[in-house]
């Protein structure tokens, strides 16, 4: 049974930083593309960042230069380092996993098979 468990969310002032973690179990972690999405109240879930099939990285324009995705395959964990946070970054953040394959569109939430429960990030102004 695959499980993804996010942690590290919380309340932070604008300009601050947080690091989210996503611990995975029940899968061969190194074979999976990992992504982060977020959903603000009343809005649809949106792409934040993900590893591409060739272990490249892609970011949404709104987080480029502020957020960094990383992974530790030995620990079966993905991370999202968020810096210079803004109030508009307030959302529930989700990690997601999908078996890496040719033609995978990592920016699309529809591609992902497994999702964590989400962790709340609130940025105060």
Image: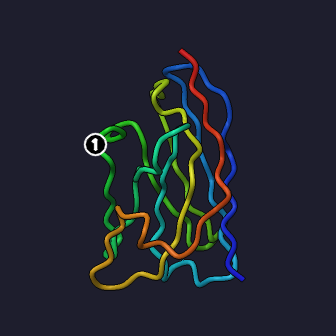
Q: Quadrant of the N terminus?
A: bottom right
Q: Is residue 92 above or below residue 21?
A: above
Q: Is residue 31 above or below residue 41?
A: below
* Residue 7 percent location from the top left of the image: 69, 50
Which residue shows up at 60% across the image and 47% down it? 20
Q: Nearer the viewer, residue 107 or 59?
A: 107
Figure label count: 1
According to the image, label 1 marks what residue? 61
**What is the basis of the colouring in this image?**
rainbow
Q: Secondary structure at mark 1?
A: helix
Crowding at dot 1, Cα within 10 Å, few <14 / some 14-19 / many 20+, comes out as few
Left or right: where 105 falls relative to 81? left
* Residue 71 percent location from the top left of the image: 52, 63
Which residue shows up at 48% across the image and 83% down it? 31
**In the image as oriented, which residue stretches furthest toward the top?**
125
Which residue shows up at 50% across the image and 47% down it? 38
Which residue shows up at 66% across the image and 47% down it? 119
Left or right: where 37 falls relative to 2? left
Q: Nearer the viewer, residue 25 or 92?
A: 92
The quadrant holding residue 107 is bottom left
* Residue 66 percent location from the top left of the image: 39, 36
* Residue 21 percent location from the top left of the image: 62, 54
């Amino acid at each position: 049974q695959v499980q993804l468990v996010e942690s590290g969310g919380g309340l932070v002032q604008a300009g601050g930083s947080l690091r989210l973690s996503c611990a995975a179990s029940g899968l061969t972690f190194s074979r999976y593309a990992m992504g982060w999405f977020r959903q603000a109240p009343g809005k649809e879930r949106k792409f934040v960042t993900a590893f591409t099939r060739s272990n490249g990285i892609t970011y949404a324009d709104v987080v480029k230069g502020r957020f960094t995705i990383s992974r530790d395959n030995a620990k079966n964990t993905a991370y999202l380092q968020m810096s210079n946070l803004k109030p508009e970054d307030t959302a529930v953040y989700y990690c997601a996993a999908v078996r890496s394959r040719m033609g995978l569109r990592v920016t699309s939430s529809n591609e992902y098979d497994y999702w964590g429960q989400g962790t709340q990030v609130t940025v105060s102004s």
